[in-house]
Image: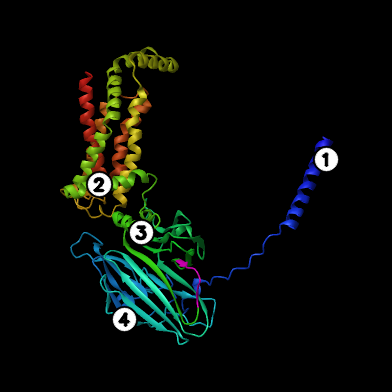
Amino acid sequence: MKDEIKALYLAVIASIIVIFVSNLLFPQKKVAPQQEVPSIENVENKNEEETIVFNEEPKDKQEILAKDHRIQIKSPSLLGSIRVKGGRFDELYLDKYKETLAEDSADVELFNPAKSANAYFADFGWISNDKTLRLPNSETIWQVKGKELTPQSPIVLEWNNGQGIRFIRKISVDNDYMFTIEQDVENNSGKAISLYPYGLLRRQHDTKAAGKSIIHEGISGVVEDSLEEIKYSSLKDKEHEDYKTQGGWAGFSDHYWFSALIFDNNAESKVKFSNLGNNMYQVDFVGPEQTIASGSVASYDTKMFAGAKEIKLLDEYTKKYNIEKFDLAVDFGWYYFLTKPFFYILDFLYHIIGNMGWAILSFAAILRLAMYPVASKSFDSMSKMKKLQPKIKELQERYGNDKMKLQQETMMLYRREKINPAAGCLPMLIQIPVFFSLYKVLNISIEIRHAPFIGWIKDLSAPDPLTISRIIHFPVPGFFDIGVWPIVMGITMYIQQKLNPAPTNKDQARMFMLLPIIFTFMLGHFAAGLVIYWSFSNILSIIQQKAIMRKNGVD
């Protein structure tokens, strides 16, 4: 024991000597302290106009818009305006999408000005550690070149700070949802200056009023090579999350709509997700330092996406602008490897057939055909098990009081007949990820939003509207007030269950009998497209199972 303690002491002393000698012979290089990057919070003028308090009565949006001179935005996909004062993007509508199915429904609203209900806007500019520099901010009145912003006609904003520095901002938009903001700074001040480019998205969101959804809604982005998804409620008051990233994107994600700042692939950006208090949230970035000698010009380009989560379009942007994992703006869920291919198959079928409902049914048939070999073996096994039901009942009568013996004799019977009772579970295990993936597709795909089917189904992404209360004209409690298609699905589940051999355990048998009822009401408020798919898939399964049972001589 003493020898071990001595050895320990010697080891510690030897380690100290090695560390001391290493530091003496190989001193660490002193790293010059990096210049502190200025905070983006100091950009805004802290006046009453820009101070947004959620609890105060919001001002009328049209009155706010009428106060300032504006540059109109007109494209095949977007309508809105940019406020000349501050150069702020604070009015934006998605021209291809309506709020409801009503003929007179308004366009989907994305950006709103400060002080209005649901304020939501974007700002871009420059910040500096030099407090003597006059920089453009939310009160700057820009000189405008151009009448309106269209895909064919960009607009240019110019402002001279009176210190020999001119700021130029060129804004362009494509036919879809991508804005490009090109910022130039001409320095004729007689001295070198250092500036940092920035961009921010700010929105007001009442977390208490927000409904529950399986789709992520909140702050999302790909920073530091990984997807970050932060719910509004996760960011406590006055808290923020900080990142450093090269490339990627970040913004605010709603169910079908999305805004994002796209970061430079060739330089590091400091990114921050913030809760500013009063239900106000911000996503911002600060780009790399730009040192501008007198008589020279510095440039920095930024892209901003503001629009609908059209999966194919996001994939196009990913390739065109080399945006890392831009498709993850869509919440594909755990089964990304299934969900995204399922979307493309559905989209392909839709463009052939012309109706998303029929495309879903065609997809169900294709899946059933693809799973036929596995399902066939399963149904074959279940048919043989059903044929054995009389012999199993005999064993139950003989060994009813001895459960251990009953189980042993039952397993021996299965071995003699070469039946695997677990084989019937395999298709169900395979269908679980298929079900969840399709469920995701029908919830995330904007292409299915407001897509009609036949009869009373006008929106496959919404629950069946022809509910029991509408049929009998009598109020029914919400959970039990389900549509016709969920009832059809429940009936097909019951028929399918009756074709399978009953469990030997009576308690299990009762539980299995309740499953169709449980699933009927549980899925009764799911998207109609999913319920229609499940019903049709059950019908195909029943037909297949009946054919296999007939082949095996089972009634």
The local secondary structure at tag 3 comes to loop
Q: In the figure, is residue 124 to the left or right of 483?
A: right
Mark 2 and mark 1 residues within 8 Å of each other at the beta carbon: no
Dominant SS in magenta: strand
Look at 37% across and 25% down and name the residue there: 422
Look at 34% across and 27% down and name the residue there: 509
> Is residue 323 shown in magenta?
no
- Number of residues whose C-alpha sits closer than 10 Å to that of mark 4, classed few (under 14), some (14–19) or many (20 or more): few
Distance between the alpha carbons at the discs numbered 4 and 1 = 83 Å
The local secondary structure at tag 2 comes to helix
Distance between the alpha carbons at the discs numbered 3 and 1 = 66 Å
Q: Is residue 401 above or below residue 345?
A: above
Question: 147 or 541: which is nearer to us?
Answer: 147
* Highlighted range, magenta: 284-292
What's the residue type where badge 4 is placed?
Lys
Distance between the alpha carbons at the discs numbered 4 and 3 = 34 Å
Sequence-wise, the earlier of marks 4 and 3 is 4
From this viewpoint, is residue 84 visible? no
Mark carried by residue 346 = 2
Q: Position of residue 251 (x, y in %)?
A: 40, 62
Sequence-wise, the earlier of marks 2 and 4 is 4
* Residue that mark 4 sits on: 145
- Quarter of the image with the N terminus is top right
Q: Nearer the viewer, mark 3 or mark 2?
A: 2
Q: In the figure, is residue 228 to the left or right of 466?
A: right
Q: In the figure, is residue 465 to the left or right of 236?
A: left
- Number of residues whose C-alpha sits closer than 10 Å to that of mark 2, classed few (under 14), some (14–19) or many (20 or more): many
Q: Position of residue 138 (x, y in %)?
A: 42, 78
